Amino acid sequence: MVKNDAEDLAKKMREVSVAEFFEKNRHLLGYENLTKSLLTIIKELVDNSLDAANEAEITPTIKISIKQIKDNRFKIISEDNGPGMVEDKISYAFGKLLYGSKFHRLRQSRGTQGIGVSGAIMYSQLTTGKATKIISSTGKNKIHEIEMMIDVEKNEPKIISHNEKDNEKGWHGIKIIMEAEGRYTEGKQSILEYVRQTAVANPYAKIIFDNPNSKIVFEKVTNEVPVQPKEIKPHPYGIEIGIFRRMINKSNSRNIISLLTTDFSRVGRNSAIEICRISKIDHKRKPNTLTHDEIDRLHEGMKKVKLISPATDVLSPLGENLIKEGLKKEVKGEFFVSVTRPTAVYRGNPFLVEVGIAYGGDLKQEGSAQLIRLANKVPILYHQGDCATLESIIETDWRRYGFSQSSGSMPQGPLLFLIHFASVWVPYTSEGKQAIANYPDIVKEMKLGLQEAGRKLAIYVRQKNKLKEKMIRKQIFERYIPEIVDSINDLTGIDKKKLKEDLEFITKKNTKLEEEKENGK
């Protein structure tokens, strides 16, 4: 006889909140080990501050402090000069996972999921059992100080205390104080490297980094701030059938024409009528009266009608000048080149690729080139081998630009690559946001950007090599001048001093003529 446990199993079933899920699966958010966990906290705090300042069109100043309390425990303080947050939104913005303003927008931003800072607070309380203090002001009369934790079973904020004080100096921004387990190291995948790369990508920001070993100030080097990105509506070519069904069921549009022209980008009235004709659906129908089969036909019809590509002015690139300034700020190279590609599209989402290359100077002469990866101006430090950026560099033939390269490897030499991917929706390979998916369209654009930058670099490298060869020839000739002088003096009796002066003059004249020829004079 088989025992029936269905009723017992049913009693044990309950809903799992998103906070509870991520508490048990924190590695999905980047909290895999002590070193990476501390880095993830700092990353989320800095990204949040930069996004807020950029949206408010404020030149950001960010202060980060990490102080070790005891073994593997740190006190972390983050403060910015952003717009702050209104009182009734503070606890939800920081104490409820998947709560925010960015997820439902098609707009380029550093964060999109509404998990970042609230995930850091959840990790803090999980590893220390302590509340997080949040201090905020919009610059008006009051400063709000809230101590809070997250009720993970309900995914709700739990306020421990809430105090107000007068804002006598008109301060605006957010200050966060928390404790968490972690490990501070300095190296290739460290917090210091993340902050350094953030300074490269945001040369208009001032970042003060007070860490356990030192205090470093990354000064801003320009007041030029990138143009703010625009929000767009989804393009029909990139919409999935499941999302399309949900849009139709929730739509208040009077008819299908209205749905297609107002809820999507790049669909005019004539295109909407053509989509309905191909789908064999009356365009006067109300969207929420469509059957499953009709929705499927309408979805297929959208793909068959030729539509204008998504708008290309909705992104906020760094720009070629800012890329160069950012690299020069932190890299002591001898030559810098940057390229911003035109906007392209993948799965209906606009994106663009930017490439910067630093060459020579203090960069290592031997070994593989270095790589800085950025997605919407945010440095990516882990899982480089899974990222489209690395694949695009490896697939580019760097031998044609004067560098040695083994099959399936990075080029060798004093090189540092910067690849910035900007999009309204970055296709990360996981929730940890540490690698960009290898979509063919994305890899193609990255390779085109690298090839364009490579051609510019190759011109400089060839000129440098020619000059080096010329100097070697000159040095060889100058080395034998004394012997030539002696030989000619023995044969002709001409004064040695005059002979030497004449030969040195000829050498300098020929060198100058060669330089003028190369410069097109």
Image (tube, helix red, strand yellow):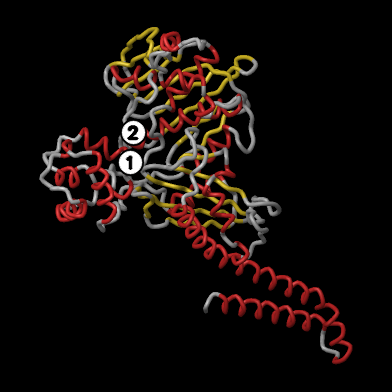
Coordinates of residue 84 in the picture (x, y in percent): 33, 25
Q: Is residue 61 above or below residue 354?
A: above
Q: Is residue 128 above or below residue 445?
A: above
Which quadrant would residue 296 be assigned to in this image? top left
Q: Dot 1 lies on which element?
A: loop
Q: Tag 2 or tag 1, which sits nearer the N-term?
A: 2
Image disc number at residue 107 = 1
Q: Is residue 519 above or below residue 412?
A: below
Q: Nearer the viewer, residue 342 or 435?
A: 435
| Type of amino acid at the residue the image marks with label 1 | Arg
Rounded to the nearest angstrom, the CA distance separating label 1 from label 2 is 8 Å
Residue that appears at 16% across and 37% down: 289
Image disc number at residue 291 = none
| Type of amino acid at the residue the image marks with label 2 | Lys
Coordinates of residue 291 in the picture (x, y in percent): 21, 39
For the residues labelled 1 and 2, say whether their Cβ atoms are less than 8 Å apart: yes
Residue at image mark 2? 102
Coordinates of residue 370 in the picture (x, y in percent): 61, 48
Q: Nearer the viewer, residue 265 or 456?
A: 265
Find the residue positioned furthest to the front.
1
